[in-house]
Image (cartoon, grey):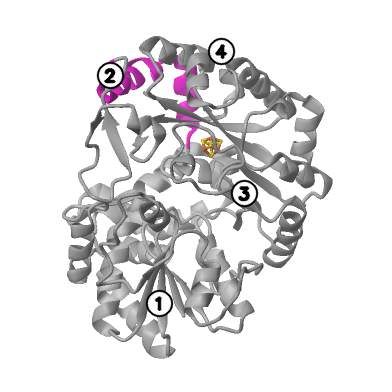
Amino acid sequence: MLLIYPPVAKPTEPPPGIALLAGALQGQNCPVEIIDANIEGLEYLINKPALQDDTWTKRAKKNACAHLNSLRDNRTYLNPARYQRCIADLNRALNQTTERATISVSNYVDGEFSSVSSHDLLAAAAAPEKNPFYDYFSPRLQQALSSSRHEHIGFSLNYLSQAVVTFAMIGHVRRIAPQITIVLGGGLITSWMRHPNWSNPFAALVDRCIDGPGERALLNHCGIAVNHSTALADYSQLPLERYWSPSLILPYAASRGCYWNRCSFCPERAEQNRYTSAGANQNLDELHQLCQRWQPGLVHLLDNAISPALLDGLIQRPLGVNWYGFARVNERLTDLDYCRALKKAGCVLLKLGIESGDDQVLAQMEKGVTSALTEKVLTTLKQAGLATYVYLLFGTPGETPQAAEHTLTFIRRNHAAVTFLNLAIFNLPTNSSDAQQLALRPFYQGDLSLYSDFEHPYGWNRGDVRRFLEKTFKKDPAIAAILRRDPPQMTSNHAPFFVEGC
Ligand code: SF4
């Protein structure tokens, strides 16, 4: 079995999905090879000659290797201007290699094929040579398929930014190895397959699409009958020293789904993803084993919300390494001793989906928190010396312009406790309960689009929200100062390295 993680996704840490699948397959003595085609492909393009030779492009290409080394050096994160120059030059070096697509260190937008149109993805598969990564993946796939007798090849498709390249690679595999079985899995495929309109438009090209956790399905596909897999991720085949971070980041998901699972806007709820976890004790056993084996500099907890039991466990059985992840605002986080204990246990940053500073909006979203509680949590985390990455969501069906102003006031008042800030405009999941009650307007043109635009009940439409964010919210001096801290493109993936003491 050959497993591939295609471009483009942030190359800050090894891809956890294919590493977990590798561990599961090897645990059953099933030979497996894994390739992070994302980091290989990005570095290939960065070193490829540019189409233009303007001064900036020449400088970007000349310094590309040095910039990659800088991103792997702690000292760069003490100098935000230097970090920003690295990212800007790497984007330039990538983007100037093709006229067919807009490529950055974190995104890929094809000029011809849409990532949310099955027709376009099949067209990308029919013409792989058009893809900007073709010169990389054509010899690489040839080499991987000829050096071992793989019977199956699996692609891990998690983000829209990977979709067009994934299908170009699949189309190429079909040409050079028509006998091989092609399997497609990952977060994006899962979301597509769980949509009520899914009718597998890829059946003629892909042998099997897998939704949800792939370990059992993949083992069964290879003829190994198991009910569940408890294998650990195996990163041994990945180029761990090459990721674009100053130390190895170990990604780990202690759960799937979300233990809260009630927020009205949330795709987890819309997709009816069940919450599953092996439990805090087993999570901690696994985390200790993984840290012992891979010696990371930072653990990235991938859970939608780290459970209170796991937070307690991390205090009682510290990993001896820094960690960060998403937590839900809750009463425990108003206890200063508890927050200090989290910090002592290695927590450097908590990501918090605060969404709004208006209580009516929070109630309408079923967030289960109030702005007063959130304010107390922010204050306590600040007192304990923990950094925060705060996520806000504007333009939800319950929000009015006045409510958005309340959010602005809330952040301004708490600006000292907000280390980083992410602003998003609400995308309505087409299969959510809210979508049944609203007048919908097409958002992305394409049969695979998971979101819809809608007629806002208070006339607070996307254009108005965008104007408010650009002209009012981002212009507030306290908020502008927070936004300037955000690591461009890499955002929360690199944010912990900008936190003192990480
Ligand atoms: S806490 Fe986060 S993941 Fe959980 S339901 Fe709410 S938005 Fe979704």
Q: Which residue is mark 3?
A: 301
Give the crowd class for mark 3: few <14, some 14-19, many >=20 residues within 10 Å: many
Magenta span has 213? no
In the rendered image, which quarter contains the C terminus?
A: top right
Comparing marks 4 and 2, which lies closer to the viewer? 2
Along the polypeptide, which appears first: circle 4 or circle 1? 1
**What's the distance in space between the residues labelled 4 and 1, CA to CA?**
53 Å
Q: Residue furthest top?
A: 402
Comparing marks 4 and 1, which lies closer to the viewer? 1
Q: Are marks 4 and 2 in contact (CB under 8 Å)?
A: no
Q: Are marks 4 and 1 in contact (CB under 8 Å)?
A: no
Using the image, tell me which numbered label, if any, was put on residue 153: 1
Give the crowd class for mark 2: few <14, some 14-19, many >=20 residues within 10 Å: few
As helix, strand or loop, the secondary structure at mark 3 comes to strand
Q: Which residue is mark 2?
A: 464
Disc 4 residue lies near ligand 1 with CB under 8 A = no
Q: Which residue is mark 4?
A: 413
- Between residue 176 and residue 396, name the one nearer to us: 396
Amino acid residing under circle 4: Arg
**What's the distance in space between the residues labelled 2 and 1, CA to CA?**
46 Å
Along the polypeptide, which appears first: circle 1 or circle 3? 1
When asked about the image quadrant of residue 112, the answer is bottom left
Vertical side of 351 occupied by 375: above or below? above
In this image, 252 relative to 482: left or right? right
Along the polypeptide, which appears first: circle 4 or circle 2? 4
Give the crowd class for mark 4: few <14, some 14-19, many >=20 residues within 10 Å: few
Report the span colored magenta.
459-486
- Give x and y (percent) for residue 10: 44, 53
Amino acid residing under circle 2: Asp
As helix, strand or loop, the secondary structure at mark 2 comes to helix
